[in-house]
Amino acid sequence: MGWVIALALVAVIGFAAYVRLAPSDPARWHVPPMAEGAWDDVQAGQGSASLRLSQAVGAPADLLARLDAVALATPRTIRLAGTVAEGRITWVTRSALWGFPDYTTAEVRDDGLYVYARLRFGGADMGVNAARLRDWLEQL
């Protein structure tokens, strides 16, 4: 019985280490965001969320600069790749307990700012990405 508990403990620690230490490849995550649905409203998906901000909300480049400040003020969030000058930024936000990474990419386009948030591990995010996008939208 002791071996089973020890093996389970090693598996949990190994999983936790993998989740926290697995590298984030910008080539995989810093890609043009997919965003569909209504303008200026968060659209929740399975393990993801998207948002398209129209020109009515603001100039897309200005919105990206403001969103970058909001994102970087979010706990456990860092910039993975991109800059405001490039017109596309990808941030990584990690969950508090396990450190699960979620990736959010925002890109300036002619018709607005497109934002796409998605999980890395698993198939469902329990609404976390949509909640984060709603919070960021409120802070804009």
Image (cartoon, rainbow, N blue to C red):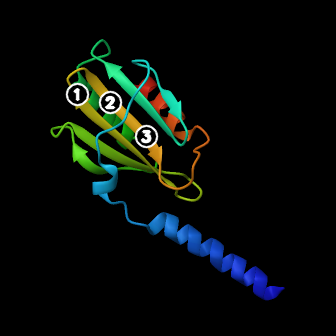
Seen from the viewer's position, the closer of residues 101 and 39 is: 39
Question: In x, y percent, where is residue 41?
Answer: 45, 20
Which residue position holds label 1? Answer: 109
Instruction: Say which amino acid is labelled 2.
Output: Tyr
**Could you classify mark 2 by the number of other residues whose Cα lies within 10 Å: few (under 14), some (14-19), or many (20 or more)?**
many
The numbered dot on residue 117 is 3
Instruction: Say which amino acid is labelled 1.
Output: Arg
| Residue occupying the point 28% across, 56% down | 27
Question: In x, y percent, where is residue 70?
Answer: 37, 35
Q: Say which element carries label 3.
A: strand
Q: Say which element carries label 2.
A: strand
The answer to whether the residue labelled 2 contacts the one labelled 1, judged by CB atoms less than 8 Å apart, is yes
Question: In x, y percent, where is residue 46?
Answer: 55, 39
Image-quadrant location for residue 73: top left
Cα distance in 3D space between marks 2 and 1:
7 Å
**Could you classify mark 1 by the number of other residues whose Cα lies within 10 Å: few (under 14), some (14-19), or many (20 or more)?**
few
Quarter occupied by the C terminus = top left
Seen from the viewer's position, the closer of residues 113 and 138 is: 113
Q: Is residue 102 left or right of residue 2?
A: left
Instruction: Say which amino acid is labelled 3.
Output: Ala
- The disc, 2 or 1, on the residue closer to the chain's N-terminal end is 1
